[in-house]
Amino acid sequence: MVIIDNLSRRKIDLDLGCSSLTPIASPEVRVDTWNAMSGREPIRFVNLDLAVEYERFVAMIVKERPDTMVHFAEQRAAPYSQKTPATKRYTVNNNVGATHNVLCGIVESGLDVHLVHLGTMGVYGYGNSGGEIPEGYIDVKLPGGRDKNILHPSYPGSVYHATKCLDAVLFQFYAKNDLLRLTDLHQV
């Protein structure tokens, strides 16, 4: 098993002059602890930026031949995504670039990899749904009377949530066009 991380969360905390409420050990310490205590297959850590190191990532997929990938490689904070034009650009470039590179990398590898992504219910716009937040596909009648099953319309409340909407559109396209196996978990 391999953990890939560009360590951006730590950099963002430093840029903001804050630290995590929960102390976070370095990836090397966490991997060493797992390997020493688990008695299971060793884990490796690779410092890699999925948004910009595409060729290196594809080479890693081909070498490792994963059955499943869990994709958390996104800037994770809605407030940070709204802070400045620079944080807005970083959020879009990092989040959308990383997701698209993961999808393209899976296709280019030729492997049947199941991608699991951590999304957010925020793509539907908290408080704008009249109570329950609808999720998934809904039946609509298109002009001309055709019935169609479409992804529920999004209503993001931040740049961060907008990137998650773009992820969902990319997932829909790659599932349809390239038959990728994808699971997008939308937590509250």
Image (spheres, rainbow, N blue to C red):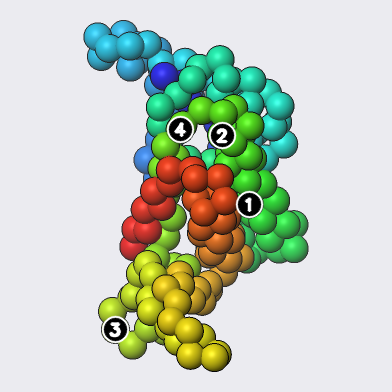
Q: Nearer the viewer, mark 3 or mark 2?
A: 2
Q: CA distance from mark 4 to mark 1?
A: 19 Å
Residue 4: x %, y % from top left:
53, 28
Residue at the location (42% across, 73% down)?
Answer: 149
| Disc 1 from disc 2: Cα separation | 16 Å
Determine which quarter of the picture holds residue 59.
top right
The answer to which image quadrant residue 24 occupies is: top left
Q: Which mark is residue 96?
A: 1
Label 3 and label 2: CA atoms lie apart by 38 Å
* Mark 1 or 2, closer to the camera: 2
Give the answer, above or below, for where 16 lies relative to 51. Answer: below
Q: Nearer the viewer, residue 115 or 121?
A: 115
Residue occupying the point 55% across, 61% down: 169
Check contact, mark 1 vs mark 2: CB within 8 A: no
Question: Under tag 1, what secondary structure?
Answer: helix
Quadrant of the rendered image containing residue 170: bottom right
Q: Nearer the viewer, residue 79 or 1?
A: 1
Q: Is residue 141 visible?
A: yes
Q: Residue at x 37, y 40 (%)?
A: 22
Residue identifier under label 4:
113
The numbered disc on residue 106 is: 2
Q: Is residue 77 above or below residue 154?
A: above
User: Residue at 57% across / 20% down in the picture?
Assistant: 62
Dot 1 or dot 3, earlier in sequence = 1
Q: Which residue is mark 3?
A: 131
Mark 4 residue element: loop
Q: Amino acid at mark 4?
A: Val
**Residue 3 in the image: x percent, y percent?**
48, 25
